[in-house]
Every structure is written in structure tokens, then in C-alpha cells.
Amino acid sequence: LIFHLASGVYQAADLAAGIAEADAVGRSAWLNTINGQYADLVLDGGTVYIDGAALDPAAAELTASNGLIHTIDAVMLPEPRTIGQLLTDPETAARYELNTLSSAILAADSSVLDTLNQKDSGGFTLFAPTDAAFAVLGEDALDAALADPDALRSLLAYHLLSGVARSGDLAALLAQYNNTFTVPTVEGNDIVITLTADGAFVNDAQLLISDVDAVNGVIHIIDAVLVPPFDQ
């Protein structure tokens, strides 16, 4: 039920305006729900959709003393799976072109998947390289990492942050720190988050898709593999 509830009062016109503003700068639009996950916002043919459910344009917005109620045409379901479960699901991995990352997680020692499945640790943020990103890394380098359990664990942990940092959180930090800041990874070394005229970057990897929700965190998809400094 709390996936259907957001802090703040948003009329349909406010939601539509927010979607238009996000579209203008090439970002996705969303609402942060009370359960902690984001609900995607889309404007199609004048109708606002929230996580796939259409706001009924014929229904009046119901005003309450503490907010506003919208009528929608479907039940919204929060993502019940962990980051680890999402990335090791063949359908999800194929949809986001994360097949190589999925294989690497399954090839790593069990502690990697155990970490990605934790639900009581405060959550995680994973920067997930696409299949194309791993292809650029090269087959020899990937094979070497897969053959070395410690190197593979370090490589994967360098893509993982403790705590949940959705795009809105990253944007706020970028604004606070003049468009660049560093953050420690689970591997131990820092990564650098930067905003340029070309988009948002993690080290030299560009952010392609943000805010893929999981029950224990969020996944951001990037176009390059992040390599820990000691491997460079």
C-alpha cells in the first residue's frame, strides 16, 4: 500500500510539468514513494502514467485535509527482488544488456551474491556495466578476472556502494559539490561522480539508465567497466 503513497501534494498538472522538465534535459521522471522505491512517471497522449498505471483523466482529484488522491487504473507493485536476484535473472539481464555482469556475479565466490542479496544492511547502489562495456574491456582481461577469485571480487565490489543513492541523491550531491565528488566503494577505493555537458559520469563511465529499483537498493547502468586503481 505504501508504494501508492508519496510525500507532497501533486496535482496531475504538476506531474505532467515535472515529466516535461525531465524530458527536456534527457532524464526520466519519477516519484519517490513512502516504501522507498521510485515510481516511474510517463506522459503519453496527454495521460500521466505512474509505474504503468494511468491517472484517470475523467476522475476528479480528491482533496483531503492532508493531501490529494488520484484514481489510477491498475495496482502498482513494488519490486520484490534484491539486486542479486535481479541481475542473476536471465530475463532482466537480457532486457538491460547485463548478461556478462550476470555471468561474472555467478562465477564469483558466493560472498558476492550474498552481499547483493542482503536486505538488512542499509541497502546498496550498484553501477552495472553493459555487455558492450565488458566487450571493450577485452576478452583476455575478462578471462583473467574470472580465473582469479580475488580479482573478480574486487572488480565487482568496486562497482558497489554501501547505501542507496538514487539519481536524485546523486544530483543533489553534484549540486552541493560543484558537479564533482568522490565516494568510497565496497572494494575500498573511491570513485568519482561528475556532471558535465555530456551527462553524468562515474569515473570515465557514462550513466546510461538510472534508478532500476530493487528491494535492497538501486542499480544504475553505465557504459564502461570501472577498474580499481591497483589494476590499472
Image (cartoon, rainbow, N blue to C red):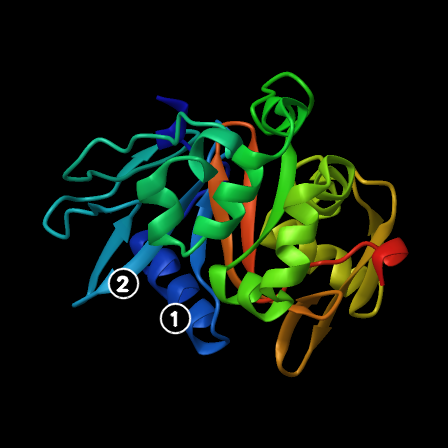
Give 76 or 90, whichever is nearer the viewer. 90
Give yes or no for contact between labels 2 and 1 (Cβ–Cβ under 8 Å). yes
Q: Position of residue 220 (x, y in %)?
A: 56, 52
**Closer to the N terminus: mark 2 or mark 1?**
1
- In which quadrant of the rendered view does residue 180 lie? bottom right
The answer to whether residue 116 shows anywhere in this view is yes
How many marks overall? 2
> Which residue occupies the extreme left position in the image?
58
Q: Quadrant of residue 4?
A: top left
Residue indicated by mark 1: 20
Q: Residue at x 70, y 35 (%)?
A: 163
Q: Label 1 neighbourhood size at 10 Å, few (<14), some (14-19), many (20+)?
A: some
* Image point (72%, 47%), residue name: 155
Q: Which of these two is toward me, 19 or 100? A: 100
Mark carried by residue 43: 2
Which percent across, then down, holds residue 43? 27, 63
**Residue 129 picture location, percent across and down:** 57, 57
Which residue appears at 44% of the width and 30% of the height? 66
Q: In this view of the protein, which residue sits in the foreground, 205 or 43?
A: 205
Question: Residue 218 appears at what percent x and percent y?
Answer: 55, 41
Quarter occupied by the N terminus = top left
Residue 205 vs residue 18: left or right?
Answer: right
Query: Which amino acid does the dot numbered 2 rest on?
Result: Leu
Left or right position of 199 against 132: right
Question: The residue tagged with tag 1: helix, strand or loop?
Answer: helix
Crowding near the residue tagged with mark 2, few <14, some 14–19, many ≥20 C-alpha atoms within 10 Å: some
Residue 165 appears in view:
no
181 shown above or below 106: below
